[in-house]
Amino acid sequence: MNYRTALVTGASKGIGAAIVESLIAEGLTVHALARSHDALRVLQQRLGPNVKPLVADVRDHEAIASALGAAEIDVLVNNAGGLATVRPLYEQSAEETAEVVALNLTAPLQLIRLLLPGMIARKRGHIFNMTSTAASGVFPGTTTYGAAKAGLSQAGRILRFDLAGTGVRLTEIAPGRVETDFYLKAFDGDREGLRKRMYSEQRPLGPADIATVLVSALRLPDHVDIAELIVAPSEQASGGQIYPPAPQR
């Protein structure tokens, strides 16, 4: 493939680390962005010198731009995100709501804005936005998260019009349930409780499954763009109905 250099956010573990590994196997140099210096060093030791640790908060696009310097990024993987809590919106704090929007919508848009001019000038590039089935399905307690991911999904649709004819592709990957630590904070750090509730009965996806799908889209000839992909476990169907009793007045 014509791509040489990638930036992967949320790269220190889970889906992000699996994507870094897959891109390294394809021969790319990967700038791996996360907040944990130690975790990124471990990743580099495991995968080799083509992993370039970039320690930063994904919301700090100015620090990221400074760290990248003159690096020409061909592939941007907007993987980092967060879910502060799984509770109705009216039970969240203002800070929790703002954090979810900043991580899942504002930060990816800022990185796209930062890196697109170079991709367009070089007439090559591929942006991957990792959204979620929560962007289109209904999952109780995920109002802000679903809204942010839906916003990123719609941003991608609009961007494809802006990018038509530039040589830059954009792919949205919307995973269903993937077995990672993503929900650990929302479960107050209760790893065993998370495993029992989310991963013990149905077969979840693994991070490597998402990485495989991403690389498959990246390998396609440059006149082919897989615009949107929903990747779900065989046992998961999004959405549903609920009919509680009416309130007693």
Image (cartoon, grey):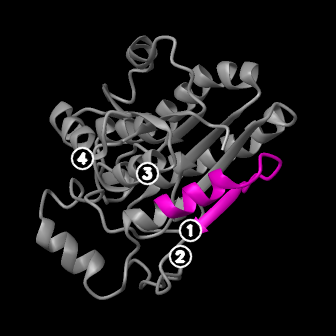
Give the mark toward the camera: 4 or 3: 4
Q: CA distance from mark 1 to mark 2?
A: 5 Å
Task: Kindly identify the residue that appears in the image at 36 percent across and 59 percent down.
Answer: 88
Q: Is residue 12 above or below residue 179?
A: above
Disc 3 crowd rating (10 Å Cα; few below 14, some 14-19, many 20+) is: many
Q: Amino acid at mark 1?
A: Gly
Q: Is residue 136 left or right of residue 249?
A: right
Give the mark toward the camera: 4 or 2: 4
Task: Kindly identify the residue that appears in the image at 15 percent across and 35 percent down.
Answer: 38
What x and y, as percent, mark residue 79?
45, 45
Q: Is residue 199 above or below residue 120?
A: below
Query: Can you identify the residue that label 2 sits on?
Result: 238
The residue stretch that appears in magenta = 211-230
Q: Counting residues from the N terminus, which is met first, the one under dot 3 or under dot 2?
A: 3
Give the mark toward the camera: 3 or 1: 3
Regarding mark 3 in the picture, which secondary structure is present there? helix
Instruction: Look at the image and say whether residue 51 sits in the magenta stretch.
Output: no
- In this view of the protein, which residue sits in the foreground, 22 or 206? 22
Q: CA distance from mark 4 to mark 3?
A: 14 Å
Q: Which mark is residue 19?
A: 3
Query: Can you identify the residue that label 4 sits on?
Result: 46
What x and y, as percent, mark residue 227?
72, 54
Q: Amino acid at mark 3?
A: Ile
Regarding mark 1 in the picture, which secondary structure is present there? loop
Q: Counting residues from the N terminus, which is met first, the one under dot 3 or under dot 1?
A: 3
Q: Which quadrant would residue 198 be assigned to in this image? A: bottom left
Q: Amino acid at mark 4?
A: Arg
